[in-house]
Each structure stands twice: as structure tokens, then as C-alpha cells.
Amino acid sequence: LASRMRVKASEVIAKLMGLGVMATINQAVDVDTAMLIATDFGYEVEQGITEEIGIQLLEESQEGGVAEPRSPVVTVMGHVDHGKTSILDAIRKTDVAEGEAGGITQHIGAYHVRSSAGDVTFVDTPGHAAFTEMRSRGAQVTDLVILVVAADDGVMDQTREAISHSQAANVPILVAVNKIDKANADVDRVKRELSDYDLIPEDWGGQTMYCETSAKKGIGIDELMEAIQLMAEMLELKADRKRNAKGRVIEAQLDKGRGPVATVLIQEGTLKVGDYVVVGMHSGKVRAMLDDRGRNMKTAGPSIPVEVQGLSGVPQAGDEFVVVTDEKMAKNVSQARAMKAREAELGASSKISLDKLFEKMSEGDVQELRVIIRSDVQGTLEAFAKAAEELSTKDIKVRVLHEGTGTITESDILLASASEAIIIGFNVRPTVKVKELAVKENVDVRSYDVIYHALDDIRKAMVGMLEPTY
Ligand code: GDP
């Protein structure tokens, strides 16, 4: 700005300070600030097409391509030790490309399996925490969830969490009842328990597909792969492979020899070596791509995970990547994004809180108050969930996303953050670490001793009568 106006940078910085903006010499300022400053120096700022709009135009110009079927992207969830890893390993063994020359399994965060039933991409970090962390960054990469439940153990805490996290994200669930080789396996018990969570088996007149597996003995794995394909067909998953690529970062790190590397999952289009990309707040040119077997790839299409080299920095899991026309645009967009992220960090939160509920309802922003409940005793959970949902009016529905006994967890905070929910705890207090995460994620966590007070606060919030607490 200073050089365009032919004044010293220090003069511009001094003016900025006068406005209360502590800027450094290479910092970007927003348009409004630039306008104010320029006026002081006798110039006028004209707002042209920003690079973000440029991307939008680029995207719109590519619409209308042919959407073709793509393979499903699957995340495996379930309670610890119920067999998530074992099932993933067993599936990997069914890969028809297994043993093909020049491929040694690499851990890049996701992998693509070619089976006789069809192709499937698996996200390699099983579990609901990783799933929801991605979602809290706006990334929804999973098309369907395989919920693994051990037939000898039944529904446990993390099973319930996995269900809440999947359902909050509206991702359909396929159940794998595992460990059926065990003497004390009881498949019917698992079906009964899961029926309480809207996962009623098809053979009981419900909508949920169940597979019976033994990862250890390799039983039911082919059927599981077929069930995944069946569900994928029903979901009609499609993508246009002709357009410029876009997708999400699955994981990323700084590699000693190769610099920043990121595993990206292509969601639309085809990524090519030599493409200019924006990845989160970084940019770059795709120098090389490796698949999940460490093989060099020249192109990668929808639902394919590849490890990309050539980025200017290490992005975060969940970040969006998009191919742009040239290097200049890549740099400009990534800078614009970095600036926006800084502003968002400094600016007020837009997350939901009980204090702001009425305001947001009035603006038409909220039609649903989502709550996560934690209590020291089961009885309180049931009573409160029922009473809270009964508070629903024609303007706003109260919906309980998850309930559980015991203290508020980090996974609760992430679920609340990703789903714009509030957390209500009865006689439970979050740990310092969980509190810090809540502050960072802007999640409203409220603690009560009695049900009545919590209900009262919700009722008041719904009509704009809740006194703010500081
Ligand atoms: P995760 O924590 O859900 O990833 O569970 P793992 O895959 O690590 O499995 C936990 C334990 O259960 C391991 O000792 C596995 O060998 C065992 N296991 C997994 N699947 C089966 C199965 O189908 N039958 C039996 N008997 N054991 C299994």
C-alpha cells in the first residue's frame, strides 16, 4: 500500500497505529482499513475482484461437467479392542492388487482397496475423535461409517460416542458385529442394544445393514465389502473427474528430505503433477505424488488419496485444497486465507451459546438447539434429555446429540464444536485441559446441580430472557 502511494512504509504503519491497528511491514490489511489510510494520503482505494471470488468464478466456470460414480470413503469406528484395526487389516488382505509389483504399503493416512466387490477408500485413523476433529474444520470426507461392535462385549461407551458422532454428521452407519468366533458371542444382544440407537437391523424390519465378522478368522469380510458397495450404490456417490481437482487434507507433516508433505483425498476432479494448488493457508506446485503403496503417480482422480510434495508449508488435517490457474493466484489466495484466519481468531466467535441463542434465533440463524449432556448418574441423563426435548417449540427444536455418564471429554468438545452444540453437565466438572479446549473451540459449557435450573435457563434463553453470565 505504501509503495503504491509512494510514501514511506513507516508512515503507513504510524497511521495504522493511530487507528489502533498494530501492523508490521509485510502484514496484509483489510479493504476498509486500506480505504481509511488511503484517504488520509489523498488516495482512493477501489475494490477489485478478490482472489477468493476468483476461485469461485473458476469453480462456477467448471460446473456442468459429467458426474460419474466414484468409490466410497469409509471410516471405521467402535469401542477400543472391538477389532477396528483387525478388520482394516483383514480387508487390506482382500485387495486384489496385493502382491502386485512395486508396491509396499505406506502409511499415508488413507488407502484405497480394490476388491472383487468394488473399490473402497479407508481413512486410516479409526475412531470418532479424528473424524469429528476434521468435521470441526468443515471437512466431511467420510461417506459411511463401519461401526465395529464385539459380539462378546456389546455396546460400550465408545460405541455410543461413535454413534452420536456419526449421526450428528448425518453419515450412515453399517454395523460389523465382530468376534463371532468367540464362544460367548451373542449377535442378537448386540442388535437389541443397538436398536435403542435407531440402528434397527433390516431383518427386524429396520434400515440398518449388519454384517457378522471374525477379523481373526477372516469370516464375513467379503460380505462386509459387498455391503459397503450396496450402501455406496444407495448413496449414489458421484464426482466430475474432468474438472480441476479439489479435496481435503487427511494428514500432513514436515519430511526431513522432502519438505512439507500432505496426504490429500481428492473429492472432485483430477489432480496432476505440475498443478498449482492452494492448501489451507499454504500454496505450491505439485512436484510429485505418491500413492498408498509408495508408487509415483502422474494423476489422481476422485476418492483417491495421494501424498503430495511441493507445498510452501505444512497444512492441517481437514484443510481444503483446490487447484488454481497459476502461481500468482495460488499465492494470493493462500495469503487471503491466512489473513481471514487471523481475523477470525481475533474477531468474536460465531459459535452458539445459550446467551446468544435468542439473538441467533431472531436472525433466523438457528432452528435447532443441539445439546450434549453429561451427568454423574444415568437417571439424570434420561430425565433431562426427555424434558429438554419437550421444550421444543414451533420456532426451535431442542435436540440431544449425545448423552453419557462421567466427566466432559475432549471428544464432547469437538462434537459440540463441529455440530454447533452446547454442553450441559450435571455434577461433573471438566478438567483444566478440557476447559482450555472449550475456550479454544468457543464451546459453551454449563454446569448445573439440578435439572430444574438447567431447564429453566434453556426456557429463558429461548425467549430471550436469560441474563448473560460473565
Ligand atoms: P481395536 O482397538 O478396535 O483396533 O481392536 P484390535 O483390532 O486391536 O483388536 C483387539 C483385540 O481383539 C486383538 O487382540 C485382536 O486380535 C482381537 N480380535 C480382533 N478381531 C477378533 C475376532 O474376530 N475374533 C477374536 N477372537 N479376536 C479378535
Image (cartoon, grey):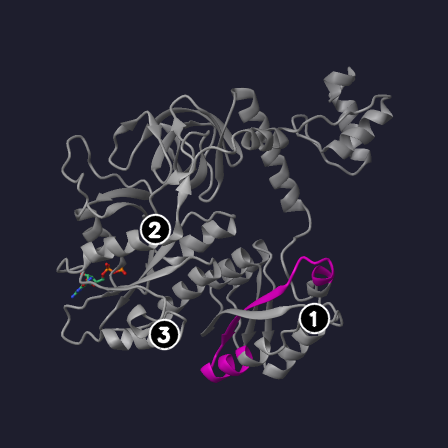
Residue 91: mark in rendering: none
Mark 2 or 1, which is nearer the eye? Answer: 2
Task: Determine the image quadrant of residue 32.
Answer: top right
N-terminal label among 2 and 3: 3
The amino acid beneath tag 2 is Glu
Residue 46, given in percent of the width and then of the height, sits at 77, 25
- Residue at figure coordinates x 59%, y 35% from the top left: 337
Work out how far the residue at label 2 is from the one at label 3, CA to CA, in angstroms. Answer: 24 Å
The residue where tag 1 is placed is 462
- Residue 363 belongs to the span the image colors magenta: yes
**Residue lying furthest top:** 6
Work out how far the residue at label 2 is from the one at label 1, CA to CA, in angstroms. Answer: 41 Å
Asked whether 226 or 350 is in front, the reply is 226
Q: Secondary structure at mark 2?
A: helix
Residue 195: mark in rendering: 3
- Residue at figure coordinates x 28%, y 37% from the top left: 292
Residue interval drawn in magenta = 359-385
- Residue at figure coordinates x 44%, y 65% from the top left: 164
Q: Are marks 2 and 1 in contact (CB under 8 Å)?
A: no
The number of numbered discs placed on residues in the rendered structure image is: 3
Residue 233: mark in rendering: 2
- Residue 68 belongs to the span the image colors magenta: no
Residue 212, given in percent of the width and then of the height, sits at 22, 65
**Above or below — where is 152 with respect to 231?**
below
Q: Secondary structure at mark 1?
A: helix
Task: Determine the image quadrant of residue 66.
Answer: top left
Residue 272, given in percent of the width and then of the height, sits at 39, 25
